[in-house]
Amino acid sequence: MQRQLIPATLLLLIAGEARADDVQSGAGDKEYNLSVGPGAAIFPTYQGSNKSRVIPLPVIEGRYGRFFVDTSEGIGVDLYRDDIFRLGASVTYVAGYDSGDVPKGINGIDDTAGARVFGSVRLDRFTFSVGAVQSIGGAKGLVADAGLSYYLPLTPSFALVPSVSTTWADGKYMDNYFGISAAESVASGLPSFKAKSGFKDASLSLTGIYRVSDRWTVTGNVGATMLFGDALDTPLNQEKWNPTGFLGLSYRF
C-alpha cells in the first residue's frame, strides 16, 4: 500500500485562515455552509526526498454552527470564534510514508489520526496562526506549527495570499520519522542516527483564490519547504528544499 505523506504546511496553506469565502459574497452569513470539489496536490514522497508525487486531494470546507470539517483542520469544533480570534480543536489525518519510498531496509510509518488544537488572530489583512497535533499512532509524537499570511485582494473576485510558516517536533516524532535504528542501519547500510526535538522546517507559499462565480472558486498554491536541524542532517535526507503545489476547484452550496 502506498501511503501519502501530505505535509502539514501544505494543508495549512491550502486552506487555513486564507479561505475562499473571503472572496465569496454571503458565504459567512449562514449558520451552515459547504464547499466541495476536486483537487490535486504535488509534494515529496517523504520530507527530504528527491522524488515527488501527484495525488488527488479534494477541497472540503463545511460548517454547521461551531462544528466544521475541512481539508486543513480535519473534523472539529470552534471553541471560540469572532472576527479577530479563533480557537478550536479537531481530529485530523496524519500521514506516514511507505517503506518503498525510503531506502531499502528503512521501516515505513503508518498513517494515523491526530488530536489537534489551534488558534489564530486576524488583524486587518494579516493572520497569525498556531497549532499542534499529537499523533495517536504512526510517528506518535507532537508537531507544532506557526504561520503568518497576508490577504491581498487584487480585484473583487481575485486575491493572492503570501504566507510563511514553520514547524517544530518533539524528540519522539523526530526520531521515529528521521531517525535510523541500529537494526535499520544494518539492513540499509546507512549509519544509525538519533534525531532530537527542534524546529525541522520553514516554508514559503503563495496562494491564489479566484471566484469564477457566486458558487465556483478556483484555488491554487505553490510553495517550497526548507529543512533544517536533524531533519536536514539525517542520512535519509536527499534534498534541502522540497517543492509543493495544489490546484482545486470548489462549488459552494
Image (cartoon, rainbow, N blue to C red):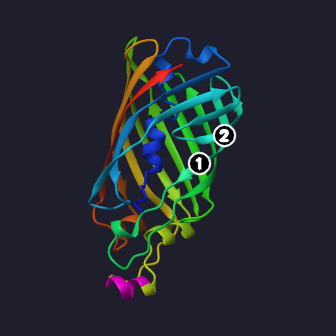
In the rendered view, would you say 253 is above or below 230? above
Residue at image point 50% right, 67% down = 174
Mark 2 crowd level (few <14, some 14–19, many ≥20, 10 Å Cα): many
- Between 129 and 95, the one lying in front of the other is 95
Residue at image point 54% right, 31% down = 61
- What residue would you read off at disc 2? 76
Left or right of 126? Residue 207 is left
**Residue 1 shown in magenta:** no
Q: Amino acid at mark 2?
A: Gly
Left or right of 180? Residue 118 is right
Left or right of 172? Residue 157 is left
Name the quadrant containing residue 122: top right
**Residue 185 shown in magenta:** yes
- What residue would you read off at disc 1? 92
User: Residue 54: horizontal and vertical position, in percent?
Assistant: 32, 47
In the rendered view, would you say 39 is above or below 175? above
- Circle 2 SS class: strand
- Circle 1 SS class: strand
> Magenta-highlighted stretch: main secondary structure?
helix
User: Residue 164: horizontal and vertical position, in percent?
Assistant: 42, 41
Which segment is the magenta one?
A: 184-189
- Between 51 and 47, the one lying in front of the other is 51
Q: CB of mark 2 within 8 Å of CB of mark 1?
A: yes
Name the quarter where the N terminus is drawn: bottom left
State how far apart marks 2 and 1 are (Cα).
8 Å
Q: Amino acid at mark 1?
A: Thr
Residue at image point 38% right, 59% down = 47
